[in-house]
Amino acid sequence: MTALLVALGAAAGAPLRYALALALDGRFPAGMLLVNALGSGLFGLFAALSLGDAGWALLGVGFCGGFTSFSSFAVQTVERSGRAATAYVVATTVLSVGACALGWVLGSRLG
């Protein structure tokens, strides 16, 4: 049952990631930056809400895992030159960690 919940969450997250990245990525991967920051924020929110095993499998592991992408981030970083790559790494890291912390704070207040 847990594997099915993870698969269902990922089946929703991955196409949404693809659509956002396709719509927003250009010379700079703004779509993947947004996806990774938003997904990290949701992950922090879901973690703070203590969803239980089924909710965590569906939303944390499945949806957020399918929605965000470290592999795309890594490839897009390598494809860029020095300063652009550095800017992308710093922006993604700072925004994603910050969004996760913000999600945690929000979830802690809601839960």
Image (cartoon, rainbow, N blue to C red):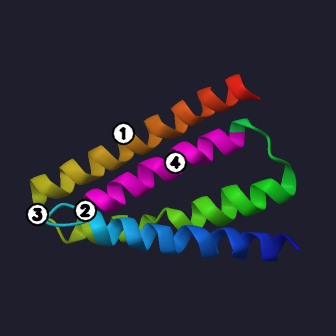
The answer to whether mark 2 and mark 1 are in CB contact below 8 A is no
Q: State the residue position of label 4.
A: 40
- Place of residue 22 in the rendered image (x, y in percent of width and height, measured from the top left): 31, 72
Nearer to us of marks 2 and 1 is 2
* Real-space CA distance between mark 2 and mark 4, rounded to the nearest whole angstrom: 17 Å
Expressed as whole percent of the image width and height from the top left, the position of residue 63 reads: 63, 63
**Disc 3: which residue:** 81
Q: Quadrant of the C terminus?
A: top right
* Amino acid of disc 1: Val
Rounded to the nearest whole Å, what is the CA distance between mark 2 and mark 1?
A: 15 Å
Type of amino acid under label 2: Pro
Above or below, 106 relative to 56: above
Q: Secondary structure at mark 3?
A: loop
Query: Quick one: label 2 or label 1, which is nearer the N terminus?
Result: 2
- Out of 110 and 91, give the one closest to the viewer: 110
Q: Is residue 104 left or right of residue 31?
A: right
User: The magenta stretch spans which residues?
Assistant: 30-47
Judge whether 93 appears above or below 64 on screen: above
User: What numbered label is drawn on residue 29?
Assistant: 2
Q: Which residue is mark 1?
A: 94
* Numbered disc 2: secondary structure: loop
Q: Give the residue drawn at x 47%, y 38%.
A: 99
Q: Is residue 111 magenta?
A: no
Q: Earlier in the sequence, mark 1 or mark 4?
A: 4
Amino acid of disc 4:
Ser
Amino acid on which disc 3 is placed: Ser
Q: Residue drawn 68% across and 55% down?
A: 60
Q: Nearer the viewer, mark 1 or mark 4?
A: 4
